[in-house]
Image (cartoon, helix red, strand yellow):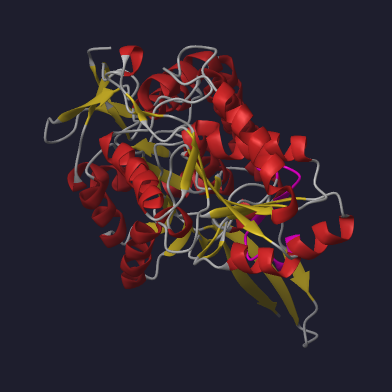
Amino acid sequence: MTDIQKMYIGGEWVDSISGESLEVRNPATGEVVGRAAFGDHRDALRAIDAAHAAFPEWSRLLARERSRYLYRLYELVYQHRNELAELVSAEMGKPIREAKGEVVGSADYFLWYAEEAKRVYGETIPSSFPNKRILVHRQPVGVVAAITPWNFPVNMVARKIAPALAAGCTVVLKPAEATPLSAIRLFELIHEAGFPPGVANLVIGQPDKVGEAFLKSPKVAKIAFTGSTRVGKLLMAGAAEHVKRVSLELGGHAPTLVFADADLDLAVKGVFESKFRNTGQMCICTNRLYVERSVAEPFVERLVARVKKAKVGDGRNPDVEVGPVINERGLEKVLNHIEDARSKGAAVVCGGNRLTEGDYAKGYFVEPTVLTGVERGMRVLEEETFGPVLPVAVFDTEDEAIRLANDSPYGLAAYVYTRDLGRAVRVAEALEFGIVGVNDGAPVQTQAPFGGFKESGLGREGGHHAMDEFLEIKHISLAW
C-alpha cells in the first residue's frame, strides 16, 4: 500500500486539515504496510459537528430501520472477513488464525446489536394519583466519542460502535494510530452499507489533541474508551467539566488459580490460550499464575512443554501461534520485566530472550517465557506485562489463593481451574473481578457483559447490558 488512506467525516473521505499523514509498519518485519491521514483537534471538531448534525434524524429512525443498517454491515464484515483479518495481521502482527477469529467475532457484534436495537424497552409505573400516569422512556444519549486500542483493532471498534448505533447515537471514532488501516476498511464497509452521512465518523490523529476536542466539546455526550488506566483516569477527570457520561475498559492484571484437583491438561490448554493468545497483549490475559503447591511441579512441566512447541514468527504465516509485540516500547517493557524478575531471584525455565536472528532480525520478537520462583516486589507480579511472559507462584490454601488473586488495584478478569463444584462457586464469587472463567481460558462472548471492577473500569460492553451505556432514562408524567 502506498496511497494515503483518508478519514471519514460526514459521509465523505477527507484528508487531514494539516495535510499530515503517518506510516503504518508491520511489527514483524518493519515494512511499511500503509499510510493514513493524521489529523488533530480541528478534524475531530469537524467530525463532532457532522455527528451532532446527523443525530436528530438517526435517533428518530424506527428501531427496525437502524437494525437493517446494522444487519447489512454484519453481512459486509463477514463477507470481507479474510481481507480484514489480513489487514489486522499486517498492521499489528496478530497470528492470522487469531485475526480471522477476531473479525468473525466483530461481525457478530453488528449482528447481535441489529437485534438489540429492537429491544429498547420502557415501562409504566403505578401512580400515586388517579389523574396521573408514570411512563419511563429510554432514549439515546447523543454523540458518542469512541477511542479504541491497537490490540484488537476491529473487535474493539465493533464492540463500541455497534451498541451505540443500535441505541440511536451517532459516533466519532478515534482508532489507535498504530492500527488505523483495519478501521479505515471497516468504515468503507459502513459507507457501503448506506449509513446516513454523519452517523459514523472516523478521525485518525494525535491522541492528546483529539481527546481534548472530545472532552471540551459540549456536543459530545459520551466518551467510550479502552486503554490504560492512567489515560482512563485523565479522560474521567476531563469529562467532569461537562458531566459527560463515560464507559472505561482499562488495565488488567489477571490471575489464574490452578487447584490440585484440577484437570491439569485442561488447565495447561486454558492457561496457554489465555496467556499467549495475541502474544499476551490482552487486558484479560493471564498475567499472574498461582498453582497449588502439591501439583506445581508437574503442572509447570506440562506447561513448559506446551510453550516450547509454540511457533513464533510473522503472524501472516498460518502456522505461527505467537507473533511480535507491537513496537520498541512494548518490547523494552517485556524485556525489563524479565530482567527485573531474574535479578530478584526468579528462575527462567523457558524462553527469556529477544529473538534477533534470521527472520526475526527486523521485528519485535520475544521468546514465550515462563518464570518460576516469582515473589511480591517483582514487576511481573505488580504490573501488566502485555507480552508473552508468564510468572508462576504457588499457594497452599483456598483462602490464600483468593487473597493473592485479589491483591491488586485491577479487577478485569480472573481464571479458576478446579473439578470441585463447590470450590468453583465459592472462589468465583469471592474474586473481585468483572469476568471469571472457570475451567475456561476464553470466557468472552458477544452476548455476555464485559467490564471490570476497581481500577479496571466503569460500565459494560457486550450483551444487552451495553445498550444501557448509550441510553438515558426519562420519566414522563402524564396528568389530566
| Residue lying farthest to the left in this orientation | 18
Q: Is residue 53 above or below residue 114?
A: below
Whether residue 435 is in magenta: the answer is yes
Left or right: 373, with 182 as reference point: right
- Seen in the picture, residue 394 relative to 24 is either above or below; the reply is below
In this view of the protein, can residue 218 be seen by the observer? Answer: yes
Q: Position of residue 154 (x, y in %)?
A: 48, 31
The N terminus lies in quadrant: top left
In the displayed image of the protein, which residue is found farthest to the bottom? Answer: 129
The segment highlighted magenta reads: 428-447
Q: Position of residue 204 (x, y in %)?
A: 28, 36
Q: Is residue 122 magenta?
A: no
Q: Position of residue 98 (x, y in %)?
A: 56, 25
Residue 178 at what x, y percent from top left? 31, 33
Compared across the picture, whether 162 is left or right of 52 comes to: right
Q: Nearer the viewer, residue 319 or 396?
A: 396
Give the residue drawn at x 55%, y 13%: 319
At x 20% / y 48%, what residue is drawn? 41
